[in-house]
Amino acid sequence: MLPSASLGSKDEITGKRYAMYEPVHGSAPDITGKNIANPIATILSLSMALKYSLDLDKEAEQLDKAVQSVLDDGLRTKDIMSKNMKEVSTSDMGDAIIAKLK
């Protein structure tokens, strides 16, 4: 569930920071099409991009809070499932996070 960022230096002319954002676990090609992947690290990588490359701190914070809220509600994908939690699919987890943003 860890996002990652490889941050480059800021461009002297544009002031933009070039970076690459991705979940530390990679793309999980072995479970492609099974709707069981955990999308949280990818979503949190987007949050990092909003904050560090796009200067959208408020939006990044909203996304972080949406993810935390869904986890607080007890939703879990198969890889992080634990007792008394509700197992959901990749798409269900994504939809739940989006719903928290509305």
Image (spheres, rainbow, N blue to C red):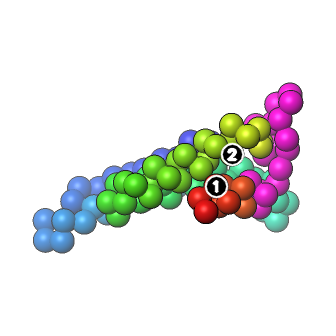
Which stretch did the figure color magenta?
77-93
Assign a secondary structure to mark 1. Answer: helix
Left or right: residue 34 compared with residue 98: right
Q: Which residue is mark 2?
A: 70
Which quadrant holds the C terminus? bottom right
In percent of width and height, residue 44 lies at: 54, 51
Residue for point 69% across, 40% down: 71
Left or right: residue 19 compared with residue 65: left
Assign a secondary structure to mark 2. Answer: helix
Left or right: residue 86 compared with residue 55: right
Callout 2 environment at 10 Å: few (<14), some (14 to 19), or many (20+)? some
In percent of width and height, residue 7 lies at: 34, 53
Residue for point 82% across, 65% down: 33
Mark identifier at residue 100: 1
Residue for point 77% across, 42% down: 76
Q: Kindly report the distance in space between the C-alpha atoms of the residues bearing marks 2 and 1.
A: 8 Å
In percent of width and height, residue 89 lies at: 82, 54
Disc on the earlier residue, 2 or 1: 2
Q: Amino acid at mark 1?
A: Lys
Q: Amino acid at mark 2?
A: Val
Examine the structure image and report whether residue 5 is included in the region drawn in magenta.
no
Residue for point 77% across, 43% down: 75
